[in-house]
Image: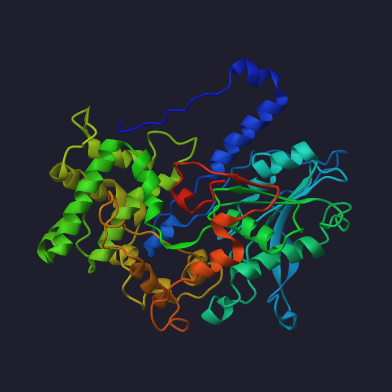
């Protein structure tokens, strides 16, 4: 194989077996590692959204749920609905139905309420985060609390309006999302016994999140202090940034060195042809990958990022058969022999990388789609850009990216090792904001990341009882607060 993971074991088996508290801590650590993972997503025409910092789903084991007194509880897939304010700055606009799910199998009076939103996804299917298969549920089990999963506004089916037009999405802001969490906590009557008497003034509430929802946890505790007693964040992208070339730095640093070396060689070859305006050479390279149908070299350069985004799909349970390591093996294992740390060189890398796209990766990334539909981003009339129906996470997330969040995943500055082409700059992503939201943007916008960081403290957050968990190999760690 081109590479492997080596895990040091800091505790002996004897210690783990005899200390229940330590067993819980280690289980929480393992689950925290799972929270560090996002899922790379295939067949997304807007390629940059494959790096969305969203959480993985946790599979829930089949079992019944009962309260401490033996009462059978509703299935955790039971959805409840909260009357959330459309606009916290104008209550005259009324309310919308915001979905949430709940588990109180461990709850006893006086215990905490653990609240989490999975962030920029349809929350249905994330009910594992209210069970003790997650850190949230482990906290509830240990502290005799209850867990809640709430859907973020404008994701899934928690929508202030029945469409995702620019006019409707004007109410999709970080501040409105913060206010949603606070209004829910301070006014909801929960469906469990005694659920009308557990407001933050009556019981401790703990806010939990990972990636963007982790950042939202930090932002909420900065912006609305005193509501949530504590917060737990995993890989929270608290510091927004426009030119986010650092996303790929931990990938380059932690991936197999031979694979990194050959990728760098191919990227340098592409960038060299681009600088020399060698359009014929670029077209030949694209055809080697089976991507000659792409009309713009920036879309081709982005397609080469797809293999790197699969790093974000790794978690403690994945092994050498994951797509990322299949890719590196395709480049680095020749006739049963691994390349050295310098790789096999650019000629072999181009042939093997191109062959991998033709035989394996295109069908994985673009099932039943032609190359332009799957990977092209320059046709503003494509349905991907014009679809305004709800439950379209890509559209809602891009609205946040274009306005407040940023995180355009680009090539690095000159002088730094590059596994991503320098053809890709923030302007590539900003142009797509105009494609998606022409009514809102007459020209490519620059996200207000400086204002976001100033308002919600970014890396400078200083809030009591706010716990950060991060991992150095996590791509989004360069936007995390490493406290």
Residue 266 in the figure: left or right of residue 63: left
Quarter of the rendering containing residue 168 = bottom right
The percent coordinates of residue 116 (x first, y second) are 67, 53
User: For the point 39% across and 71% down, which residue is it?
Assistant: 430
Q: Quick one: 423 or 223, which is closer to the camera?
A: 223
Residue 445 in the figure: left or right of residue 339: right
Rendered-image quadrant of the N terminus: top left
The percent coordinates of residue 265 (x first, y second) are 20, 47
The percent coordinates of residue 429 (x first, y second) are 38, 68
Residue 97 versus residue 146 in the image, above or below: below
The percent coordinates of residue 282 (x first, y second) are 15, 61
Quarter of the rendering containing residue 275 = bottom left
Is any part of residue 158 visible from this angle?
Answer: no
Q: Quick one: 440 or 446, which is closer to the camera?
A: 446
User: For the point 18% across and 47% down, which residue is it?
Assistant: 350
Q: Quick one: 483 or 114, which is closer to the camera?
A: 483
User: For the point 30% across and 33% down, which residue is it?
Assistant: 2
């Amino acid at each position: 194989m081109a590479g492997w993971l080596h895990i040091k074991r800091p505790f002996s088996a004897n210690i783990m077996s005899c200390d229940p508290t330590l067993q819980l801590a280690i289980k929480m650590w393992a689950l925290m590692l799972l929270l560090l993972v996002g899922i790379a997503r295939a067949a997304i025409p807007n390629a940059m959204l494959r790096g969305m910092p969203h959480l993985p789903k946790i599979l829930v084991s089949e079992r019944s749920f009962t309260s401490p007194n033996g009462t059978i509880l509703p299935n955790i897939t039971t959805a409840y609905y909260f009357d959330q304010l459309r606009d916290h700055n104008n209550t005259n606009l009324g309310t919308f139905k915001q979905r949430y799910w709940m588990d109180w199998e461990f709850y006893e009076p006086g215990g905490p309420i653990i609240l989490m939103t999975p962030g920029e996804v349809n929350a249905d299917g994330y009910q594992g985060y209210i069970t003790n298969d997650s850190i949230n549920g482990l906290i509830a089990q240990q502290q005799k609390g209850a867990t809640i999963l709430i859907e973020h506004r404008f994701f899934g089916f928690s929508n202030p309006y029945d469409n995702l037009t620019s006019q409707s999405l004007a109410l999709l802001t970080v501040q409105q999302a913060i206010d949603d969490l606070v209004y829910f906590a301070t006014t909801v009557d929960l469906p469990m016994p005694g659920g009308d008497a557990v407001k933050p003034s009556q019981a401790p509430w703990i806010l939990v999140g990972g990636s963007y929802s982790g950042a939202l946890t930090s932002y909420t505790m900065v912006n609305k202090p005193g509501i949530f007693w504590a917060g737990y964040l995993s890989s929270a992208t608290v510091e927004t940034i426009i030119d986010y070339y650092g996303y790929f730095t931990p990938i380059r640093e932690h991936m197999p060195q031979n694979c990194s070396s050959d990728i760098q060689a191919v990227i340098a070859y592409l960038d060299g042809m681009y600088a020399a305006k060698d359009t014929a050479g670029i077209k030949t390279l694209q055809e080697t990958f089976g991507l000659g149908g792409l009309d713009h070299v920036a879309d081709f350069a982005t397609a080469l990022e797809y293999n790197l985004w699969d790093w974000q799909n790794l978690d403690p349970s994945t092994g050498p058969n994951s797509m990322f390591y299949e890719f590196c093996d395709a480049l680095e294992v020749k006739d049963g022999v691994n390349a050295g740390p310098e790789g096999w060189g650019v000629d072999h890398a181009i042939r093997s990388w191109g062959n991998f796209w033709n035989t394996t990766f295109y069908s994985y990334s673009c099932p039943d789609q032609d190359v332009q539909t799957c990977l092209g981003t320059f046709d503003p009339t494509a349905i991907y850009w014009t679809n305004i129906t709800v439950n379209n996470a890509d559209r809602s997330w891009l609205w946040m990216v274009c306005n407040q969040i940023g995180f355009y995943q680009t090539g690095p500055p000159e002088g730094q090792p590059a596994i991503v082409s320098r053809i890709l700059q923030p302007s590539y992503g900003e142009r797509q904001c105009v494609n998606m939201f022409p009514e809102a943007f007459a020209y490519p916008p620059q996200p207000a990341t400086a204002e976001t960081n100033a308002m919600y403290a970014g890396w400078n957050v200083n809030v009591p009882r706010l716990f950060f968990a991060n991992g150095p190999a996590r791509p989004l760690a360069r936007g995390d607060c490493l406290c």
